[in-house]
Image (spheres, grey):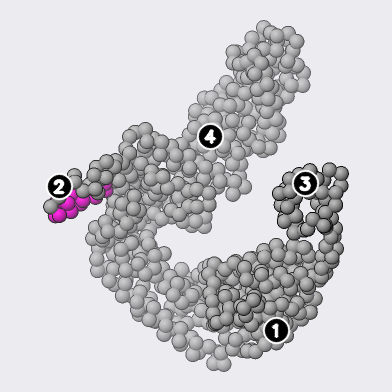
């Protein structure tokens, strides 16, 4: 196998696009050069380059083949279509029996020739999220101006250029030249292989591997922080981004002016991360440290003194802006901002954030007693939950919504439980964020997510395929996490019905308000309220509010939650099929109870008795399905007088012992129920071994099928075992 090496050297590539570009280069090479079987692909990406190494075949072997065409008697149009498809002429055909046959042959093609022919088109079609044009004389586009192309096959340049007719392709052509660090080692130099390229770039102050750059940044920042007995706040996304901004990372620490240390640490951290890509540091007790970390792209002669001073000066300006917003926001009480939410649109069909907050207040108060929270406190927290959206700090840093609301609520003298609920009601926003556990926080967080789900379901905005513009899947997973992590015993359908009713009530209120505004406008114009087209259309429009529609939407939301639970279990590597088996057999809107039952069944199936019992159940169910088509059902109790084999009596005795499964399930003693059910295994195995179910005597056959039906019925009390995999 030959080594193919490609480097695409350009002006600075946005950090967020680099990894995807390297993956796209791998995909494009593997697809476009499939004839030479690219393998062992390795790619690199950085601020000014993406590169790839692959092993490829030395050539495409010569090949011949025959394609059978239409019948010799086929219409001329069919023959013409066949020739067009294969770019052939009639003279190339031969007749073989009743059919035309085309013999095709292809000469061997060297890998170099194939690559040279394919690369210009590959680069012109290369997919960037955003690309740009530059210069004159070419329509070729790249994420930033492309400056050099390295393309080597076993060290030899594969020659091609990007000219395309009158388009000069910016004069770009393949070569063996690349460039090192812009400042430390400017100028071009030749490379002969991927290993040579990597080694020489390191000599020219470029670390080509993103993992190496991340390691240098993380380790050296941690070392600098440790010298001052501090710790760097973990921020994986920021580390990834900074590694994409520098080719030769040189970490430094800068000092934060004492006058800004009374700012909320979250404000400081977000301001540093968003505006400057700085790392926050913490004291051993977790308090914000008066230091920040950053990464330069050069090794300065003064050990970075001027760079540090410049970054400290920039950060003072940033924190001065943050200070302005912080002080200005605290001058207005949080509850005085609520009215401004009536001017913030939540969704065109669902009204404003103000209307949503009023829904949240009612729903949170309804949920509160179910989770051990005070209804009045939950309603107050819900009322204030969105007020920080109209604050200056959240306007500047949307990531701080909720966080700032907590600070403002505490400043205004609100109870700590209310303030914490304002902060926590967005949680969990992802798998790594803990779910709220304080009762008031739980009530408001559930209200927020269930209102979001029911509102968008009510207007028909359900997730479809991969599209989820309103993050409803995340909201559903948030509901599931809160319930599971806190062990909440909730009747979700009842809560969803309350939420849907409030959504429809809010929509009707909004509709009436718009109608009143239209009538007032009509009166100002000297028209009667009913004479305007808008007023007529609004009079004719109604918001559905029947109990039947409310029930349907609530059931749809509950079904969506249950489906998300299945998906989450599947992604966690747990038995999602057991959950499906339970829900198919027994509808239940108590997720904790459902998961408890699922856990007990999973434990049973992991045991030898459970696995064998599942096999026996399937055998019984298959027999019954076939025989019931003939003369079923067999739902009458079996007659002991018709037992002819001891195994029948033993199975009947085991079934009698299992009659206690139902009461155990009602008492939610699922472990005991599974233990009782496992007692069927031995008798059922013996029954299938010793007894002929389809006996010649009709009475015996019917009685034995009734016995198997009892097995199926008892197990179906627990779950639909036919849906369990394995």
Q: Position of residue 573 (x, y in %)?
A: 62, 47
Distance Cα–Cα, label 1 vs label 2: 79 Å
* Pair 1/4: label in front: 1
Whichever of callouts 1 and 2 sits on the residue coming sooner in the sequence is 1
* Pair 1/2: label in front: 2
Q: Regarding mark 2 in the picture, which secondary structure is present there?
A: loop
Q: Which residues are magenta?
A: 509-525
Q: Position of residue 254 (x, y in %)?
A: 47, 82
The verdict on residue 524 being magenta is yes
Can residue 8 be seen from the camera position used here? no
* Pair 1/3: label in front: 3
* Pair 2/4: label in front: 2
| Residue receiving disc 1 | 177
Residue 14 vs 361, above or below: the answer is: below
- Viewer-proximal residue among 664 and 134: 134
Q: Position of residue 681 (x, y in %)?
A: 69, 26
| Residue receiving disc 2 | 528
| Residue receiving disc 3 | 70
Please tell me how crowded label 3 is: few (under 14), some (14-19), or many (20+) other residues with Cα within 10 Å: some
> Residue drawn at (60%, 73%), measured in percent from left and top?
214
Whichever of callouts 2 and 3 sits on the residue coming sooner in the sequence is 3
- Labels 2 and 4 touching (C-beta < 8 A): no
- Labels 1 and 4 touching (C-beta < 8 A): no
The circle drawn on residue 583 is 4
Whichever of callouts 2 and 4 sits on the residue coming sooner in the sequence is 2
Please tell me how crowded label 4 is: few (under 14), some (14-19), or many (20+) other residues with Cα within 10 Å: some
Distance Cα–Cα, label 1 vs label 4: 64 Å
């Amino acid at each position: 196998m030959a080594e193919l090496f490609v480097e695409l050297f350009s002006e600075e590539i946005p950090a967020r696009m680099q990894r995807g570009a390297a993956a796209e280069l791998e995909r494009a090479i593997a697809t476009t050069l499939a004839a030479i079987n690219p393998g062992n692909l390795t790619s690199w990406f950085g601020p000014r380059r993406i590169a790839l190494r692959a092993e490829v075949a030395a050539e495409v072997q010569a090949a011949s083949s025959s394609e059978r065409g239409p019948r010799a008697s086929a219409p001329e149009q069919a023959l013409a279509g066949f020739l067009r498809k294969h770019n052939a002429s009639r003279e190339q055909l031969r007749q073989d029996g009743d059919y035309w046959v085309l013999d095709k042959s292809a000469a061997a093609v060297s890998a170099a020739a194939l690559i040279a022919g394919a690369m210009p088109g590959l680069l012109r079609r290369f997919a960037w999220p955003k690309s740009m044009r530059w210069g004159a004389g070419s329509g070729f586009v790249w994420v930033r101006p492309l400056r050099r192309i390295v393309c080597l096959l076993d060290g030899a340049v594969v020659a091609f250029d990007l000219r395309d007719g009158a388009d000069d392709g910016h004069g770009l052509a393949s070569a063996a030249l690349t460039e090192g660090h812009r400042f430390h080692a400017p100028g071009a130099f030749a490379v002969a292989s991927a290993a040579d390229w990597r080694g020489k770039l390191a000599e020219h102050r470029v670390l080509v591997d993103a993992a190496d750059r991340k390691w240098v940044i993380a380790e050296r920042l941690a070392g600098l922080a440790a010298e001052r007995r501090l710790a760097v706040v973990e921020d994986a996304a920021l580390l990834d981004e900074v590694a994409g901004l520098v080719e030769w990372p040189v970490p430094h620490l800068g000092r934060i002016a004492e006058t800004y240390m009374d700012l909320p640490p979250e404000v400081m951290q977000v301001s540093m991360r968003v505006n400057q890509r700085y790392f926050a540091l913490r004291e051993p007790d977790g308090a914000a440290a008066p230091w920040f970390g950053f990464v330069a792209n050069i090794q300065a002669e003064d050990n970075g003194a001027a760079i540090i001073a410049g970054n400290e000066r920039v950060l003072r300006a940033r924190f001065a802006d943050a200070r302005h917003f912080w002080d200005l926001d605290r001058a207005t009480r949080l509850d005085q901002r609520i009215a401004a939410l009536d001017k913030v649109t939540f969704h065109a069909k669902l009204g404003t954030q103000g209307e949503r907050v009023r829904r949240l207040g009612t729903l949170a108060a309804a949920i509160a007693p179910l989770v051990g929270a005070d209804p009045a406190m939950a309603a107050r927290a819900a009322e204030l939950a969105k007020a920080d959206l109209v604050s200056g700090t959240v306007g500047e840093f949307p990531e701080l919504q909720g966080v700032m609301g907590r600070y403002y609520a505490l400043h205004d003298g609100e109870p700590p439980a209310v303030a914490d609920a304002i902060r926590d009601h967005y949680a969990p926003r992802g798998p790594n964020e803990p779910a709220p556990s304080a009762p008031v926080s739980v009530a408001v967080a559930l209200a927020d997510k269930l209102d979001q789900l029911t509102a968008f379901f009510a207007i028909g905005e359900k997730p479809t395929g991969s599209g989820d513009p309103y993050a409803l899947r995340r909201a559903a997973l948030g509901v599931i996490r809160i319930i599971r992590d806190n062990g909440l015993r909730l009747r979700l359908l009842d809560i969803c019905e309350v939420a849907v009713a409030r959504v429809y009530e809010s929509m009707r209120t909004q509709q009436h308000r718009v109608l009143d505004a239209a009538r007032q406008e009509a009166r100002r114009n000297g028209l009667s309220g009913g004479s305007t087209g808008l007023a007529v259309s609004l009079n004719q429009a109604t918001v559905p509010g029947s109990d039947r529609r409310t029930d349907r939407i609530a059931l749809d939301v509950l079904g969506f939650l249950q489906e998300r639970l299945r998906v989450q279990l599947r992604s966690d590597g747990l038995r999602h099929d057991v959950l499906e088996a339970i829900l198919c057999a027994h509808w239940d809107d108590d997720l904790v109870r459902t998961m408890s039952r699922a856990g007990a069944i999973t434990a049973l199936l992991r045991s030898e008795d459970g696995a064998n019992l599942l096999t026996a159940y399937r055998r019984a169910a298959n027999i019954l399905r076939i025989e019931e088509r003939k003369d079923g059902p067999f739902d009458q109790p079996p007659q002991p007088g018709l037992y002819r084999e001891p195994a029948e009596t033993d199975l009947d005795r085991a079934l009698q012992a299992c009659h206690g499964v139902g009461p155990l399930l009602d008492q939610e003693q699922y472990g005991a129920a599974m233990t009782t059910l496992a007692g069927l295994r031995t008798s059922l195995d013996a029954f299938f071994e010793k007894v002929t179910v389809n006996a010649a005597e009709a009475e015996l056959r019917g009685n034995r099928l009734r016995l198997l039906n009892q097995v199926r019925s008892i197990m179906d009390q627990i779950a639909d075992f036919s849906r369990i995999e394995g």
